[in-house]
Image (cartoon, rainbow, N blue to C red):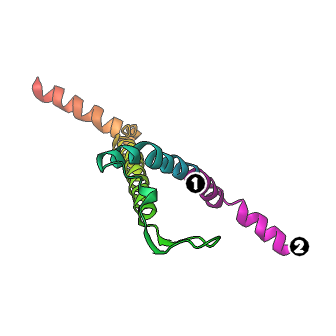
Amino acid sequence: MAVLKELKNFMMRGNVVDMAVGVIVGGAFGKIVSSLVSDIIMPPIGIILGGVNFTDLKFVLKDAVGDVPAVSINYGTFVQTILDFVIIATAIFFAIKGINALQTKKAEEPAAPPAPTKEETLLTEIRDLLKEQNNK
């Protein structure tokens, strides 16, 4: 029972829950970016390069024989995966940069000066009275 209690305490820590949410959102974000790359970005690039579909680019090491599939190095899929990574990394960079900019602005806002203490108020009044007497 002690192990179950420790497991519950571990799982309910704030940073563990935040990390789990981040992993789930990151996975969904990765699917969106993969679709962006494969469905939006790569087709025009393929047309520019002469109608090439990057996922079809491969080196065939051994041709297919009967029911045995071909053995190939699929470098086109690798190129597309690299583009996925670059786009995801860029998007995360700009998101974090925006968050950091917001946090910096909050930190830069000056706090209201503290109210003067009774001693400071009395000293200010004395100073003002002395100035008035010297000016007469």
Q: Quadrant of residue 81?
A: bottom left
The residue that mark 1 highlights is 27
Q: Which residue in the rendered view is the most extreme toward the right?
A: 1
Can residue 103 be seen in the rendering of this structure? no
Residue at x-position 30% and y-position 51% = 49
Query: Dominant secondary structure of the magenta stretch?
Result: helix
Q: Can you give x and y, in whole percent of width and height, for residue 98 in the image?
A: 38, 45
Dot placed on the residue nearer the N-terminal end, 1 or 2: 2
Nearest the eye: 40 or 132: 40
Q: Can you give x and y, in whole percent of width and height, for residue 124 in the image?
A: 28, 35
Amino acid type shown at disc 1: Gly
The number of numbered badges drawn on the structure is 2
Image mark for residue 54: none
Residue at x-position 46% and y-position 61% = 77
Q: Secondary structure at mark 1?
A: helix
Q: Which residue in the rendered view is the most extreme toward the front?
A: 66
Can residue 78 be seen in the rendering of this structure? yes
Residue range corresponding to the magenta coloring: 1-27
Check the picture and name the quadrant holding the N terminus.
bottom right
Q: Can you give x and y, in whole percent of width and height, for residue 11 in the image?
A: 72, 62
> Dot 2: within a 10 Å radius of its alpha carbon, few (fewer than 14), some, or many (20 or more) residues?
few
User: Does the magenta run of residues contain 8?
Assistant: yes
Q: Are circles 1 and 2 on residues that touch, CB within 8 Å?
A: no
Q: Can you give x and y, in whole percent of width and height, for residue 103 in the image?
A: 41, 46
Image mark for residue 1: 2
Residue 56 vs 39, above or below: the answer is below
Nearest the eye: 21 or 31: 31
Residue at x-position 34% and y-position 36% = 122
* In the displayed structure image, the side of residue 15 where residue 35 appears, left or right: left
Amino acid type shown at disc 2: Met
Measured in 3D between alpha carbons, the distance from the residue under mark 1 to the one under mark 2, in whole angstroms, is: 34 Å
